[in-house]
Image (tube, rainbow, N blue to C red):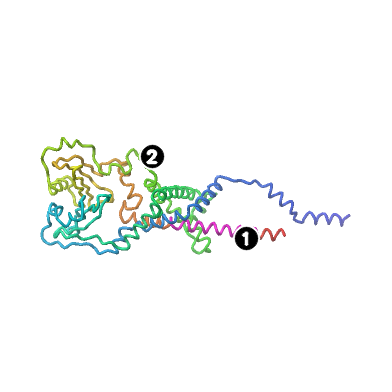
Amino acid sequence: MILNQHKTLINFARPNPMLGLFMVMGKKNTYGIRTFINDVHLWLGLVSGIIIFLVCLSGTILTFEKEIEQWFKKDLKVEAMGVKKSLSSLVNDPNIKAKGLLTSITIPSDENSPYKLSIKEDSKQRRGSTYGVNPYTAEILAPQETGMDKFMFSMFKMHRWLLMDIKWGRPIVGVATIIFMILTLSGIVLWFPKKIKWKTVKAGFKIKTNANWKRINHDLHNTLGFYACILILIMGITGLCWSFEGYRDGLSAVMGTRVFGNRGGGPEVDLERLDNGKSINLEEAITLANKELNYEGELTVSLPNEKNPIYSFRKIADNSWSTVAQDRLQIHESGEMINKEIYADKPLNVKIASAIKPIHTGTIYGGFSKWLYFLACLIGTSLPITGTIIYINKLKKKSKRRKKNKLATA
């Protein structure tokens, strides 16, 4: 009898496989909101990864587009020799007229910089080509076309429509941008640990460089993504304005002012009333503009034509804190000022709407904001790569676990 009791105790002490199975089956299989967000983050990232990589890569390169292009060109400087030629003589110069239709002139405040003339070489051109002109000799400094210009234009096409036809490429980039914004928001949620304590939260602010490469890769994705998330969201919100007209209209309605609207500036004008037979020339118009905008800065004037007999001026101060802080004037050919817009006097919503492009490209605060955007875009380019590596590592880990379980049950 003692022997039978001893056997019973031994059998009871042995691990029972069926008991373990029932315990696992009895466990609650919870699928919470965090798991759902993780799955959304994973699968959207895998689906859109290549497109996001290409868009972010091209955006990173385009951040310093002008600087890179200029680095491959000669620095266009002119030597101050006597008195500058009158603008009227430059406008009527045969060599300049032979290039095409002159639409605007930019006059820098620097005496050693050339004038910039925008010329439509073809009536179908939207903006025309920009030529540098020596204001002392009227010599045309032809734009230098380099291989880098073509490369940057290809990066622009990749960024905007993936080198595809605009009809298809633009909405694809737009959808990928929306997905990237969802990934960013879900990534912020997942960045926070399940149990929020300062010790666990603090770990998300740094990359553990002395860990194994898998942990470093995870930290690169998690930590760098957190640091770049605000700028990535700003780029996404503004970037969608080029992809979807309906989105742009909706954003305009929310902001209470037109995004990309009123580029020509100014209210509607009764041109017949202003047509009094008087006429001012270009120098007189510029003198009036500089009198109204009495500070040192770069002045751009769009010339009048048969349909629109108005001089349109834009001026930005040399010491301006922002690249978009431009003041605007409109002067009729008769010499009457039609409209005056001082940037500092504009309401905040109008300032933001007028700055959508520089906010998106990072040029709004000059070099400082460009470097921030460059780093954020570079991080955005890396996220699909580090995220995919994390997913592959998890698959390998699951595969090893399955093999181990099979060997244990065999």
SS at badge 2? helix
Q: What residue does disc 1 label?
A: 400
Q: Is residue 59 magenta?
A: no
Where in the figure is residue 301, as x and y percent of width and height?
Answer: 20, 49
State the residue position of label 2.
Answer: 250
State the quadrant of the N terminus: bottom right
The amino acid type of the residue labelled 2 equals Gly
- How far across and down, in percent of the image, does residue 383 sit? 46, 56
Closest to the camera, between mark 1 and mark 2, is 2
Measured as percent of width and height from the top left, residue 125 is found at 27, 51
Determine whether 301 is above or below 276 in the image: below
Is residue 385 part of the magenta span, yes or no?
Answer: yes
- Residue flagged by tag 1: what amino acid is it? Lys
Give the spatial CA distance, label 1 vs label 2: 50 Å
Location of residue 328 by image quarter? top left
Q: Does residue 297 appear anywhere in the picture?
A: no
Residue 379 position by quadrant: bottom left
Secondary structure of the residue carrying tag 1 is helix
Quadrant assignment for the C terminus: bottom right
Question: Residue 25: percent from the left, percent from the top?
Answer: 69, 48
Q: Indicate the quadrant where residue 395 lies.
A: bottom right
- Residue occupying the point 19% across, 58% down: 133
Mark 2, other Cα within 10 Å: few <14 / some 14–19 / many ≥20? some
Tag 1 and tag 2, C-beta contact below 8 Å: no
The foreground one among 339 and 153 is 153
Question: Do we see residue 120 in this rendering?
Answer: yes
Give the magenta-colored segment's residue range. 380-402
Left or right: residue 183 compared with residue 278: right
For image coordinates 12% across by 47% down, the residue present is 281
